[in-house]
Amino acid sequence: MSQQSKNWLLLIHQIPPKPNALRVKIWRRLQQVGAVAIKQSVYVMPCSEQSHEDLSWTLKEIVAGGGDGSIGDVRFVAGLTDEQVIALFQTARQTDYQKIVQDANTLLTDWSTGEIDPQDPAVKGAAQVSKLQRRFDEVAAIDFFQAPERGTAEILIQDLTARLSGQSSNESAAMHTLDGLRGKTWVTRKNLFVDRIACGWLVRRFVDPSAVFKFVDADTHAPEPDQIRFDMFDGEYTHEGDRCTFEVMIQRFGLQDRGLTHLAEVIHDIDLKDTRYDRAETAGLNALLTGLAASQPDDDQRMTLGMHLVENLYAYFQRQKGKQAS
């Protein structure tokens, strides 16, 4: 049994083949409460009072419709691991957040052209952002294990909200000299994925080889002196408009490197999911990082191993640049 072994609630049920409406109704209910299937007719949820209540109501509906089932409080001791179960939850929420990110990016792109004023009542910008916020809140309520895409969706919605109110983005912030960034602690959200890993690599590679990283709960973290927050709301470095944090860091660090430009295009498309650059290397890095996130729950290890992947891709782009120059 792993050190992270935990209790889960299982719903094991059987539903009559007809009427089909009951099967569809129960499936939708389980989706709404955030349960995930580990095999046919077996659903799992984190062990909590809310989960127990949600599954109990679902079981009552099943029984009332002529089916039967049981709810169990279990631990996985062989076969399926806690990490694999958590990955199932994160994958389910990933799909939900990706739809929100895509819709938010569409709005940001439209509002960044200067042809559309989000404050124009005819645009109904407030209604569009409110709808996105409601969808985000619904997904976040069943995001039990902080899917990596959550932060991207949250930051984009907050950027849209700022544009509605006429606030300027962080783009007007002054450029930082690299010397002043050394010896700091770099803070970001837990459950790392592409943008935060790439930013960590950028800091270690071009700013401070000895940089220290700290991974926190974004909702409760209070910034301390000598800390620099990245890819977090109100962070010193975070998304700006239609650019991911990695792109923002490159610009504000004053780095000019064709290899970095190509790398940033890959990171952008994975993080923002808008296929703006559509590079051939994007799918490969996305697959490797997704596998890394699924197999490595420890953020320190995930950052270290992820940096190696980013470094290798950067070296590839540098080599391609050299070939083109010759």
Image (cartoon, grey):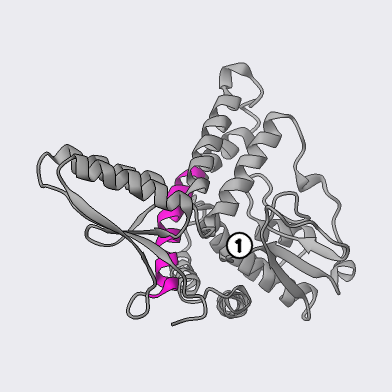
Outermost residue, top direction?
A: 122
Residue 84 inside the magenta-drawn segment:
yes
Q: Main SS of the magenta segment?
A: helix
The residue located at (86%, 60%) in the rendering is 176
**Quadrant containing the N terminus in the rendered view:** bottom left
**Quadrant containing the C terminus in the rendered view:** bottom right
Q: Secondary structure at mark 1?
A: helix
The residue located at (37%, 74%) in the rendering is 76
41, 113: nearer the viewer = 41
Give the image location of residue 127, x and y in percent: 56, 25
166, 316: nearer the viewer = 166
Q: Which residues are magenta?
A: 81-100
The residue located at (25%, 40%) in the rendering is 25
Give the image location of residue 202, x and y in percent: 70, 70
> What amino acid is at disc 1?
Asp
Above or below 264: residue 154: above
176, 78: nearer the viewer = 78
**Residue 118 horizontal side relative to residue 293, left or right:** right
Q: Residues within 10 Å of mark 1 (few under 14, many from 20)?
A: many
Give the image location of residue 156, x and y in percent: 61, 44
The residue located at (56%, 65%) in the rendering is 193
User: Would residue 326 be seen by someone viewing this image from the given angle?
Assistant: no
Above or below 161: residue 282: below
Above or below 192: residue 321: below
User: To which residue does mark 1 refer?
Assistant: 195
Residue 89 inside the magenta-drawn segment:
yes
User: Would residue 38 be seen by someone viewing this image from the given angle?
Assistant: yes
197, 248: nearer the viewer = 197
**Residue 294 horizontal side relative to residue 241, left or right:** left
Give the image location of residue 171, x and y in percent: 77, 47
